[in-house]
């Protein structure tokens, strides 16, 4: 490995990042446009429950990625982390290297000349448990929420059609106990599990995996991390979470009141508030934070949402949307960007640095018109009007 390597990331050596349809990528934030970061063999995607973990983790793309990083090269699929690095923002790469620094020398020793791994021993796995969900968030699609299948017909014969297709999952890998049994065989030294969906509380089958970890005693060494949409918090899951070394809950809430109901379509704010009160009573047992997916839809209200989270004493993790590109905050008119910066008085210096970096990053000049056209089509399909819920957009949609 080259000295002073600023491209290296430990995740391609120790991590399994699954996706709802069964594909696998080196991590959850690699560039996924046109499938450029998915594990493949002869241009055919490798799938969980059809291909082995060895085939996936030692696929050509993954092997090449590891070799590039060892040589100090900067793979393009990892550009989002490198952008953060350049702007002195803590990237997933830097964070992971810090958390697993003790394993880096071992990673190199476990790497063959072709970049493949001699032994697969996942330390950190992310399970995105299919597309079963009770919401159809505007920033989502049918590949993460099956309810989005109800709306994809609106985009037929438009520029959005190829990215908003009906998606019926035939490979329900996340319901098969044998998948979890095989995975456990490759998790000898498992340290962290991140579970999301879809909506994981709707996929009861994955509790089999948790119970196996509890039965083996491994749960006492494993940090559990969940992303949940706050529409339901079953007591049965709470009882399982309490048996792990630690449990971190990221509560997916994007805005306040009817603004949230519009963006996270299908949710009910009163139910969200009720469940927020319920889970907040477990602050002594769990690490709880709000995960706000920040997009062109809600960034104008980012400061008010920060004040809302402060009232609950909860930290916010800002997850900026990068796909689809026309939902990214950089597409906003300059006037709105300046208003956001001037009014964001409650954000920390670090949060402001990230916000500025995202707001003023480069974007295709056509993305603004794409955003407006997409919202126009979706509002017609759902019989809604963006201006009724997000009034800051009214003048831009009437002109």
Image (spheres, rainbow, N blue to C red):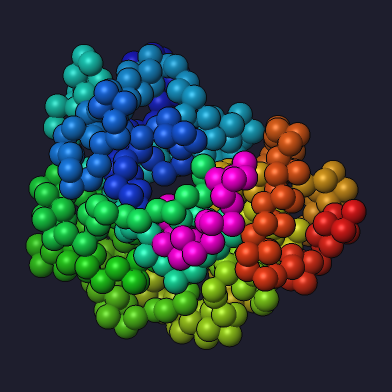
68 shown above or below 289: above
Q: Locate the N terminus by quadrant.
A: top left
For residue 97, side relative to residue 151 (left or right):
left
- Choose top left, top right, bottom left or bottom right for residue 390: bottom right
Magenta region:
143-161
- Choose top left, top right, bottom left or bottom right for residue 360: top right
Write the residue at 54% across / 61% down.
Answer: 151
Closer to us: 150 or 34: 150
7 shown above or below 243: above
Q: Position of residue 116 (x, y in %)?
A: 21, 24
Q: Position of residue 180 (x, y in %)?
A: 16, 56
Q: Position of residue 269 (x, y in %)?
A: 59, 80
For residue 387, side relative to residue 25 (left or right):
right
Closer to us: 252 or 390: 390
Closer to us: 43 or 89: 43
- Choose top left, top right, bottom left or bottom right for residue 65: top left
Please tell me whether residue 129 belongs to the stretch shown in magenta.
no
Residue 243 visible in rendering: yes
Write the residue at 25% across / 20% down.
Answer: 115
Please tell me whether residue 149 belongs to the stretch shown in magenta.
yes
288 shown above or below 73: below
Q: Position of residue 58 (x, y in %)?
A: 22, 28
Write the residue at 16% across / 34% down.
Answer: 54
93 shown above or below 179: above
Write the residue at 11% across / 49% down.
Answer: 182
For residue 193, side relative to residue 164 (left or right):
left
């Amino acid at each position: 490995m080259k000295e002073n390597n600023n491209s290296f990331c430990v995740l391609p050596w120790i991590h399994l990042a699954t996706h709802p349809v069964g594909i696998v990528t080196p991590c959850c934030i690699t560039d996924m446009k046109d499938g450029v970061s998915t594990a493949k063999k002869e241009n055919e995607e490798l799938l969980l429950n059809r291909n082995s973990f060895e085939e996936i983790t030692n696929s050509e793309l993954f092997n090449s990625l590891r070799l590039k990083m060892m040589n100090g090269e900067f793979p393009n699929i990892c550009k989002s982390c490198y952008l953060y690095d350049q702007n002195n923002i803590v990237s997933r790469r830097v964070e992971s290297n810090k958390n697993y620094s003790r394993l880096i020398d071992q990673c190199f020793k476990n790497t063959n000349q072709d970049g493949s791994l001699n032994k697969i021993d996942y330390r950190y796995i992310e399970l995105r448990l299919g597309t079963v969900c009770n919401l159809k968030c505007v920033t989502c699609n049918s590949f993460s929420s099956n309810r989005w299948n109800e709306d994809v017909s609106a985009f037929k014969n438009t520029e959005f059609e190829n990215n908003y297709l009906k998606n019926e999952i035939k490979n329900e890998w996340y319901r098969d106990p044998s998948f979890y049994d095989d995975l456990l065989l490759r998790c000898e030294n498992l340290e962290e599990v991140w579970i999301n969906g879809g909506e994981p509380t709707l996929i009861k089958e994955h509790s089999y995996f948790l119970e196996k970890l509890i039965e083996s005693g491994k749960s006492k060494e494993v940090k559990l991390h969940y992303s949940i949409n706050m529409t339901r918090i079953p007591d049965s899951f709470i009882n399982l979470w309490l048996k792990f070394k630690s449990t971190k809950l990221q509560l997916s809430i994007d805005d306040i009141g009817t603004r949230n109901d519009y963006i996270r379509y299908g949710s009910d704010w009163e139910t969200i508030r009720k469940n927020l009160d319920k889970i907040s009573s477990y602050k002594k047992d769990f690490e709880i934070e709000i995960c706000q997916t920040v997009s062109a839809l809600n960034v104008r209200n980012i400061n008010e949402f920060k004040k809302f989270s402060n009232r609950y004493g909860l930290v916010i993790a800002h997850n900026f949307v990068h796909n689809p590109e026309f939902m990214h905050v950089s597409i906003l008119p300059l006037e709105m960007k300046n208003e956001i910066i001037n009014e964001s008085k409650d954000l920390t210096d670090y949060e402001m640095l990230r916000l500025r970096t995202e707001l003023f990053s480069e974007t295709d000049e056509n993305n603004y018109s794409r955003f407006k056209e997409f919202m126009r089509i979706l509002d017609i399909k759902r019989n809604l009007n963006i201006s009724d819920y997000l009034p800051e957009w009214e003048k831009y949609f009437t002109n």
